[in-house]
Image (tube, grey):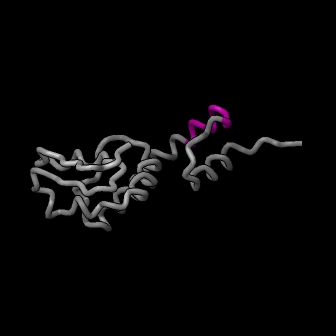
Amino acid sequence: MIQLLCTDIITTISDYTNDYNYNLINKESFKKVKQMGISHYWKEKYDNHFIDLKIEHLILKRDYNWKYECFRIKKFQKWDLFTKTRILDTHLILPQQLSEIPKEIGNLINLQGLHLYDNQLK
């Protein structure tokens, strides 16, 4: 016989996974899982990623699901394109083989043009 897992166990386990398909859990568990994604812990992990790369000018400021954002930024491998020296650039040429443009690009306040030659964007 299958027993239901306690809500606390479900939320704790989900905090360590990068899966976002929570369709099979009850509403109470889903609310807790969602709440954990916007916690200060995940926001701090997100911020520290950019601080470690010395590109803290890209840190997002609004409310997001920080857990999701952490996994998203860890997958993006081209953060060197957005270094401090390039923050003043008005035009940014992105190399080929780029599959996505991170939303943090909106923090480049001087950016007037974006050149995407032959990229395979989603």
The reply, left or right, for residue 65 in relation to residue 36 is: left
Q: Is residue 94 magenta?
A: no
Which of the two residues, 77 or 12, is positioned nearer the viewer here?
Answer: 77
Q: In the image, what residue occupies the spot 75% across and 45% down?
A: 5
Q: How many marks?
A: 0
- Examine the image and state in which quarter residue 27 appears: top right
Q: In the image, what residue occupies the spot 62% across and 47% down?
A: 11
Task: Please give the range of residues in magenta.
Answer: 24-33
Q: Quadrant of the C terminus?
A: top left
Residue projecting furthest to the front: 118
- Examine the image and state in which quarter residue 74 appears: bottom left
The reply, left or right, for residue 119 in relation to residue 38 is: left
Q: In the image, what residue occupies the spot 45% across and 45% down?
A: 38
Q: x, y (%) of residue 77?
A: 36, 61
Q: x, y (%) of residue 100?
A: 35, 48
- Predominant secondary structure in magenta? helix
Q: x, y (%) of residue 37?
A: 49, 46
- Examine the image and state in which quarter residue 33 appears: top right
The reply, left or right, for residue 7 in relation to residue 111 is: right
Q: x, y (%) of residue 10?
A: 66, 47
Residue projecting furthest to the right: 1
Compared with 76, 113 (above or below) is above
Compared with 24, 75 (above or below) is below
Which of the two residues, 102 or 7, is positioned nearer the viewer here?
Answer: 102
